[in-house]
Structure formats: structure tokens, C-alpha cells
Image (cartoon, rainbow, N blue to C red):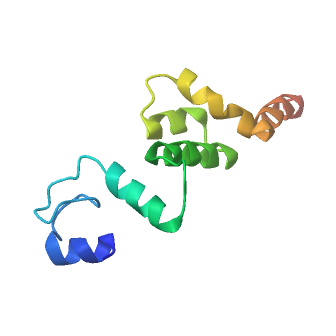
């Protein structure tokens, strides 16, 4: 059963996408995620890998490091900087903006 239908039929007033039938938040989706990966033949993949993918895609789309930091809940932008290399265009654009300011 998909999550949207499950919520509609069991806990439509819950604010959580991943909820028990009672509407309480699921504390972890690790076991279900592992089962889903096994069923489709994906090995060596964790829920946390999705977090890295999200951050990478945001940076590649030009989202500011500080915004990605806030979305990921990093304490400092230093933790988010490991993704900066994925968008060298952002650095080029910043340098080019200096040339345009003449």
C-alpha cells in the first residue's frame, strides 16, 4: 500500500508522511527502507545516502551553501562545504561578477 493511501485510510489528520495507523510519527524507516532495497535488488544503500544525494542535487542547481546547511540541519556551513565542489560554476560566476562591477 502506498504511503498516501495508507495515511488517507488510517491517519488522515496526522502531519507525518511516515506515520503509524494511530497517526504517531514513525521514529525510523531503516528496516522498511532496507526491505524495499532488497526487494528491488539494491545493495549497499542507506537512507542517509538519500541525504547526500539531496544536498548534491541542491548544490548542483545553484542553491546557496547556507540554504543547504539550513535544510540539512548542519550546525555550521563547514559541514556543508564538502558539496561545494559540485558547482564550480558558482565560483566562476562570483569572480565574473567582480569584472562586471567596473
Q: Residue at x 67, y 50 (%)?
A: 61
Up the image or down, 84 lies above or below 33; here it is: above
- Quadrant of the drawing holding the N terminus: bottom left
- Residue sitting farthest toward the left: 22
In the displayed structure, does residue 4 sit left or right of residue 81?
Answer: left
Taking depth in this image into account, of 58 and 22 the one nearest to the observer is 22
- Location of residue 35 by image quarter: bottom left
- Quadrant of the drawing holding the C terminus: top right
Q: Residue at x 35, y 49 (%)?
A: 30
How many marks do you count on the picture? 0
In the displayed structure, does residue 60 sit left or right of residue 101?
Answer: left
- Image coords of residue 95 (percent x, y): 83, 29
In the displayed structure, does residue 90 sit left or right of residue 71?
Answer: right
- Image coords of residue 92 (percent x, y): 83, 35
Q: Residue at x 52, y 45 (%)?
A: 49
- Location of residue 79 by image quarter: top right
Taking depth in this image into account, of 13 and 23 the one nearest to the observer is 23
- Image coords of residue 101 (percent x, y): 84, 30
Q: Residue at x 17, y 61 (%)?
A: 20
Taking depth in this image into account, of 17 and 47 the one nearest to the observer is 47
- Image coords of residue 75 (percent x, y): 43, 24
Up the image or down, 95 lies above or below 15; here it is: above
In the displayed structure, does residue 69 sit left or right of residue 9?
Answer: right
Up the image or down, 45 lies above or below 10; here it is: above
Amino acid at each position: 500500500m502506498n504511503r498516501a493511501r495508507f495515511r488517507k485510510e488510517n491517519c488522515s489528520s496526522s502531519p507525518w508522511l511516515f506515520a503509524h495507523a494511530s497517526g504517531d510519527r514513525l521514529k525510523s524507516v531503516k528496516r522498511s527502507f532496507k526491505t524495499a532495497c532488497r526487494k528491488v535488488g539494491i545493495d549497499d544503500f542507506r537512507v542517509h545516502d538519500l541525504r547526500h544525494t539531496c544536498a548534491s542535487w541542491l548544490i548542483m542547481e545553484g542553491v546557496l551553501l547556507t540554504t543547504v546547511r539550513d535544510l540539512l540541519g548542519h550546525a555550521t556551513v563547514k559541514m556543508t562545504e564538502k558539496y561545494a565542489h559540485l558547482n564550480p560554476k558558482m565560483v566562476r560566476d562570483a569572480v565574473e561578477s567582480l569584472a562586471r562591477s567596473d
